Image (cartoon, rainbow, N blue to C red):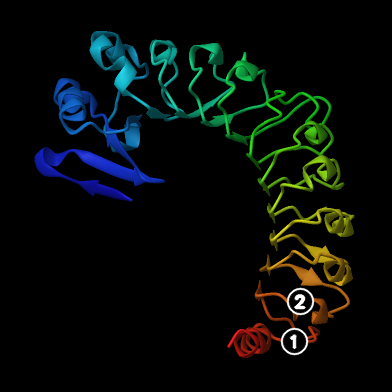
Amino acid sequence: MLKIVEGGFRISTENGREILTIQSERIKECMDFFFKRKYDGIRVDPFFGFNFTSLNFLKDYSELWKEIKYISIAEEIVDITAMMPLTELKYISIAQKNPKVDFSHFPMLENLITAGGGKIKNLELCEKLESLAIYYYNSKSKDFSEIPSVIWIKEIHISNSSVINLNGLEKFNALEKASFHYCTKLEELCCLDNASNTLTFLEFDNCKKILNHDYIKNLKNLKVLALNDCGSIPSFQFVSKMLALKSIRFVGTNVLDGDLTPLLRLDYAGFSNKRHFSHTFEEIKLLNEKRNG
């Protein structure tokens, strides 16, 4: 959510953090306002008025380096070396593919959003990292065997990837949330068993080539499952074995046998109605409302 406050400064709120957008025409005013209001971080994006291709302005504000906890950098910002002294960063979002960043500079980092399949240098030294999101993740092995071994993270989010299976994710044994968006070549689900004690949220979106959906039954503590726009699923019989599951969403996905009775015990089932389905969305919703009083 973006709002304009006094003086025409642009502020966005993200996960409870207040982020100031830097405008290249008045950098000093923006940085003074950042210090005055004690905001959490900054955003540099040409869409919001930052017209330079580097972060070199940060060199002039060493007194604020430790005050910046959050930074969001648009793809058009090609030279990001001036962010290295921001050692107190907890949240980094870099839209540039394969950014040349040594993450050993950021020991306090908790959340990273980045892009590309290149090596993410020294991310293993960020021992406080909790969430990793990678856009356009690609590797020669077509899996996750080359992903950094930050095995303690709680969340992983992958978008626009060419992986064909989930090999390499077995090392992440503390995951609580995992999501995969537009992994259009993904065929085989696997390698999440080691996180079965902790994983409660699993989402696939626009992953239409998955062949073994019933693998998901191995994730015994899963509470929320999403399979939106994922082509066709042979059956939801595997859901009967998932006793912890509370909610399922499969909007835009077909279920070939049409039998939705395994979903009747769940608290919520969201989907697009199809003629051959045993129940409509409205019927299941009404049954859930009656059961839950």
Callout 2: SS: helix
In depth, the one of 247 and 93 nearer the eye is: 247
Residues under numbered marks 1 and 2 in contact, where contact means CB atoms less than 8 Å apart: yes
In depth, the one of 166 and 95 nearer the eye is: 166
Residue in the image at 26% along x and 29% along y: 22
Does residue 50 appear left or right of residue 187 in this picture? Answer: left
The answer for how far apart the CA atoms under marks 1 and 2 are is 10 Å
In depth, the one of 245 and 97 nearer the eye is: 245
Does residue 203 appear left or right of residue 289 in this picture? Answer: right
Please determine whether, in this image, residue 51 is positioned above or below residue 289: above
Residue in the image at 16% along x and 25% along y: 26
Which residue is under mark 1? 279
Tell me the quadrant of the picture where the C terminus can be found.
Answer: bottom right
x, y percentage for residue 124? 65, 19
Give the image quarter of residue 40: top left
Res 143 seen here: no
Callout 1: SS: loop
Does residue 160 appear left or right of residue 84 in this picture? Answer: right
x, y percentage for residue 147? 72, 26
Please determine whether, in this image, residue 145 is positioned above or below residue 194: above
Mark 2 neighbour density, 10 Å: few (under 14) some (14–19) many (20 or more): many
Which residue is under mark 2? 263
x, y percentage for residue 173? 76, 37
Three-letter residue code for mark 2: Leu
| Mark whose residue sits in front, 1 or 2 | 2
Res 29 seen here: yes
Give the image quarter of residue 38: top left
Three-letter residue code for mark 1: His
